[in-house]
Amino acid sequence: MNDGMKKRYLVYARESEMDIHDVLHEISIEDQVEACKKHVEKIGGVVTKIITDKNCSGRSIERPGYQTLFDYYNFYSDRFNGVVVYEMKILTTSIDQLMEIFVKSEYDRKDLISVKEMDDDYSRDRRLMVLLNNILELSQYNKTSKDEGKAI
């Protein structure tokens, strides 16, 4: 299959500020990108753009890479078929933002793939399960962080 017929994916990777790196058990941006690229190759797609944010809280929407990602959704939707992340908390640690991304992806019929969480099942049911699991995890994490006075 030539590249013109393959699904086109954006890869998004993010690292938090260093003081919470261990709390989130993050891997480096480079390792995230490599895992995502391998996954896209495995499913027969092609990476058309890599978008990153370094030393940024996942709760903030004021991230250059995050804004670029939404620019692609809003203005260049015809140029890609989906977004691949290492895991959903890389996109955001805000439940509201996670819901917005999920709804936008569903509405625009874009794949939203989490390499770590989705195995090889990209069905709507599996995407919903991943979303719900992340909402539960973020809810608990955000409560704990708020109790401890941490910004994520």
Image (cartoon, helix red, strand yellow):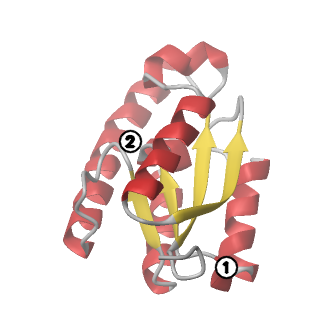
Earlier sequence position, callout 2 versus callout 1: 1
Tell me what residue is drawn at x 44 percent, y 65 percent.
112
**88 and 9: which one is in front?**
9
Horizontal and vertical percent position of residue 139? 35, 42
- x 61%, y 14%: residue: 19
In the displayed structure, would residue 110 be above or below residue 146? below
Which residue does the numbered mark 1 point to in the structure image?
A: 79
- Please, what is the three-letter code of the amino acid marked with disc 2? Leu
Q: Nearer the viewer, residue 99 or 35?
A: 35
Q: Are marks 2 and 1 in contact (CB under 8 Å)?
A: no
Residue designated by label 2: 138
Q: Secondary structure at mark 1?
A: helix
Q: Is residue 151 rendered to the left or right of residue 126?
A: right
In this view, the residue in front, 137 or 116, is: 116
In this rendering, position of residue 60 left or right of residue 26: right
Please tell me whether residue 14 is drawn above or below residue 17 in the rendered image: below
Which amino acid does the dot numbered 1 rest on? Answer: Arg
